[in-house]
Amino acid sequence: MEQKPHLQILLSSVGRTHPHIVDVDWRLDYCLKNNQVDRVNEPTFLISLKTQDLVTKLRDACKSLERTSEM
């Protein structure tokens, strides 16, 4: 893969920060039975995390400030 070094350089310029969790949705499903078994009695948690990359957010804010100052 000849593009790998180029991609690594691009990705390293973005930063190594992980996105921050800004919202969580969750749901509890409880399965009583299914087609194969009469009694399952098994809970299932479904969790959805909404994340936000702060580096991108800061870049957007800087661009917005630059546009505002040019007016």
Image (cartoon, rainbow, N blue to C red):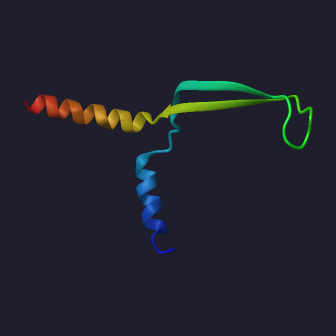
Please report the residue visible at 85 percent of the width from the left and 42 percent of the height from the top.
Answer: 35
Compared across the picture, whether 9 is left or right of 20 comes to left
- Rendering coords of residue 8 (x, y %): 47, 60
Compared across the picture, whether 53 is left or right of 33 comes to left
- Rendering coords of residue 60 (x, y %): 30, 35
Compared across the picture, whether 53 is left or right of 18 comes to left
- Residue 26 falls in image quadrant: top right
- Rendering coords of residue 6 (x, y %): 42, 65
- Residue nearest the observer in this picture, 42 or 18: 42
- Residue nearest the observer in this picture, 12 or 29: 29
Please report the residue visible at 85 percent of the width from the left and 29 percent of the height from the top.
Answer: 32
Name the residue furthest bottom.
2
Q: Is residue 12 above or below residue 19?
A: below
- Residue nearest the observer in this picture, 52 or 28: 28
Compared across the picture, whether 26 is left or right of 9 comes to right
- Rendering coords of residue 37 (x, y %): 91, 39
What is the tally of numbered marks visible in this picture?
0
- Residue nearest the observer in this picture, 36 or 20: 36
- Residue 44 falls in image quadrant: top right
Placement of the C terminus among the 4 image quadrants: top left
Please report the residue visible at 15 percent of the width from the left and 34 percent of the height from the top.
Answer: 67
Please report the residue visible at 42 percent of the width from the left and 47 percent of the height from the top.
Answer: 14
Name the residue furthest right.
38
